[in-house]
Image (spheres, helix red, strand yellow):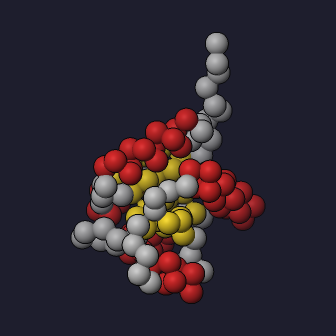
Amino acid sequence: MKSSPEVKETLLIVDDELSVRELAADMLRSEGYIVLEASSGPEALEVCAEHQCRIDLLLTDLIMPGMTGRTLADVLTARCAGLAVLFMSGYIDGTRRETMVQGLQFIQKPLDWDKLKSMIRDLLKQKNRRT
């Protein structure tokens, strides 16, 4: 019998595209992460409040209706000390350049699963060294 992966950190995935969110959540759960999901910035704020900021990493789309991923990340990092953030986007026009200039962690959609797992692991290692 195959054992399930060891439970690790808690991730919050925020994307208004259901298929992207579900696919990422399923893949990351199979890696042993506890995964919470939200379809918008306001919903993510509610999820974070319900979990009392016990979230290790925010994986959020940059471009969403109502509240951008950048605004969401700014609000959550102010509320939840030490929260790691990884942005994702399918838009190429300046989005990647903007995140690089500002020193933000970014992954392009469609997601490269090996790269996503590696980036998440690296961000969580950095976070754990700071705490």
- In the rendered image, the residue lying farthest to the top is 1
Q: Quadrant of residue 6?
A: top right
- Tally of numbered tags: 0
- In the rendered image, the residue lying farthest to the right is 129
Q: Quadrant of residue 57?
A: bottom right
Q: Residue 131 at what x, y percent from top left?
A: 70, 61
Q: Is residue 90 left or right of residue 99?
A: left
Relative to 36, residue 53 above or below: below
Q: Residue 128 at what x, y percent from top left?
A: 70, 57
Q: Is residue 27 left or right of residue 82?
A: left
Q: Quadrant of residue 120?
A: bottom right
- In the rendered image, the residue lying farthest to the bottom is 101
* Residue 89 in sight here: yes
Q: Quadrant of the image for the N terminus?
A: top right
Q: 55 or 33: which is nearer to us? A: 33
* Residue 75 in sight here: no
Q: Residue 130 at what x, y percent from top left?
A: 72, 65
Q: Residue 32 at what x, y percent from top left?
A: 59, 37
Q: 110 or 99: which is nearer to us? A: 110
Which residue lies at the image location 62% right of the left edge and 51% below the top edge? 114
Relative to 66, residue 121 above or below: above
Which residue lies at the image location 54% right of the left edge and 69% below the top edge? 106
